[in-house]
Image (cartoon, helix red, strand yellow):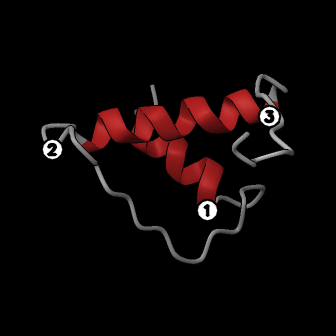
């Protein structure tokens, strides 16, 4: 069974991945987040985008 870290590495850097060259991650307010928790969020975000589960925001102006 692959860990979230393994899946995230494969999605980002694998043969069919995003061909990422440089990644910096900042835990923000949750300094207690583990690498496994952070990579779980990366996996969920990439899978959501791949599945079309996202909202396209084209107008970013404040009105």
The residue under the point 13% across, 38% down is 32
Residue located beneath label 3 in the image: 50
Quadrant where the C terminus is found in the figure: top right
Q: Nearer the viewer, mark 2 or mark 1?
A: 2
Residue 26 placement, left or right of 62: left
Quarter of the image with the N terminus is top left
Q: Quadrant of residue 20?
A: bottom right
Q: Is residue 52 left or right of residue 18?
A: right
Please give the name of the residue rendered at 80% of the width and 34% of the height, measured from the top-left corner: 50
Find numbered disc 2 in the image and state the secondary structure of the residue it sits on. loop
Apparent side of residue 13 relative to residue 22 in the rendered image (left or right): right
Q: Percent position (x, y) of residue 39?
A: 41, 41
Q: Is residue 56 above or below residue 1?
A: below
Q: Identify residue for label 1.
A: 13
Q: Secondary structure at mark 3?
A: helix
Instruction: From this view, report whether residue 46 is shown above or below residue 25.
Output: above
Q: Residue at x 83, y 36 (%)?
A: 56
Q: Position of residue 48 (x, y in %)?
A: 70, 27
Q: Check residue 31 in the rendering and tell me which mark sits there, or answer none.
A: 2
């Amino acid at each position: 069974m692959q860990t979230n870290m393994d899946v995230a590495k494969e999605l980002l850097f694998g043969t069919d991945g995003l061909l990422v060259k440089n990644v910096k991650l900042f835990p923000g307010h949750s300094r207690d987040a583990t690498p496994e928790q952070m990579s779980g969020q990366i996996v969920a975000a990439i899978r959501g985008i791949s599945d079309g589960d996202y909202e396209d925001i084209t107008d970013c102006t404040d009105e």
